[in-house]
Amino acid sequence: MKRRVIAGLIALVPVLLALWYGGLWWVLLLTFFTSLGAYEYYVLIERSGYRPARWYGFAWTLALMFSFWSLVPIEPQLVLTFGFIIVFIRILLSQQGSPPHEGSNNPDSADASDPLQPETETPAQELDHKPFRNWALTVAGASYIGLMMGQALALRLLPNGFYWMLLGLGITMVNDSAAYFVGVTMGRNRILPALSPKKSWEGTVGGWIAATLAGAAVAFWSPLELAVWLGAFIGLVGGILALFGDLAISMLKRQIGVKDSGVFLPGHGGFLDRLDSIMFVLPFVYQMALLLGAG
């Protein structure tokens, strides 16, 4: 516990400073978080035996994030499109000279197995002959982390971006904290024990209520000119999305068979574990801000 608290406090200082000052400091912080999150993702995929185009995916993730910065004259659609093509070509060319599967006269016979169960195909020499799956996993990591973190980057750079970030982070933190304490004290009915055994309906609903109140409070006290009922709505939807963001990383870890997503934060499980809820909530808040004319 002591190690966890110390690591958390050390990580919190640069986050608060970058959040307050914004601008280039926020860009640097998000670049750091996105880099480590992307690296952890591709390492996890490789641990399961797949062969994604790690460094192409890593560069693509950062390019997608930077495309949301107003100083970068490239639209996210362009980066997304060329990334699809370049990574596909990279994966395709990596198959040159690959021999067919050993013990099979039919090169396509390995595809007859369940395509969603990598545990049955863990030898690298087998998975290396499934280029489309390796391409899809590369695309999934880059688009998931790059697009989500890019919108988190753009949210702080909006007019009144500090308060929009306060809304998004406040919803996420209050939801997670309330869900934990209510779940510990009152939790009885589990939601998805196969993915997250400790999550209960009682804790989850408690988190949603707290997130709704947090959204209403930020709308009332901040200069966003946001109606209280709309702040409450954003809080409720944000709380729901925070749950699914958490479950998304849990699903990834369960399929691969690891408890933590990384080793960068001792006692905290990794950057993907820290960013899971945020990567669903902040993009939603960003889209709501644009819808309300904040851009």
Image (tube, helix red, strand yellow):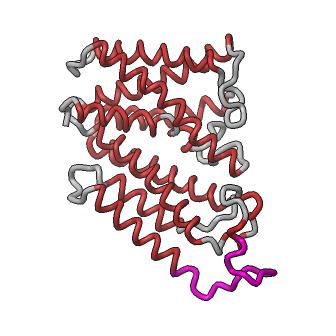
- Between 127 and 185, which is closer to the camera in this rendering? 127
Name above or below for residue 131 compared with residue 216. Answer: below
Residue 291 locus on image (x, y percent): 23, 33
Q: Is residue 235 left or right of residue 127?
A: left
* 94 is within the stretch colored magenta: yes
- Between 226 and 262, which is closer to the camera in this rendering? 226
Q: Name the image quarter holding residue 1.
A: top right
Residue 126 locus on image (x, y percent): 71, 72
What residue is shown at x 25% (from left), y 15% (from top)?
Answer: 227
Name above or below for residue 68 compared with residue 230. Answer: below
Residue 135 locus on image (x, y percent): 52, 66
Q: Is residue 77 left or right of residue 16?
A: left
Q: Name the image quarter holding residue 129.
A: bottom right
Labels in figure, total:
0
What residue is shown at x 47% (from left), y 24% (from top)?
Answer: 239
The residue stretch that appears in magenta? 93-110
Residue 164 locus on image (x, y percent): 30, 28
What residue is shown at x 37% (from left), y 38% (from top)?
Answer: 283
- Between 10 and 107, which is closer to the camera in this rendering? 107
Magenta-drawn stretch, dominant element (helix, strand or loop): loop
Q: The C terminus is located in which quarter? A: top left
Q: Residue furthest right?
A: 103
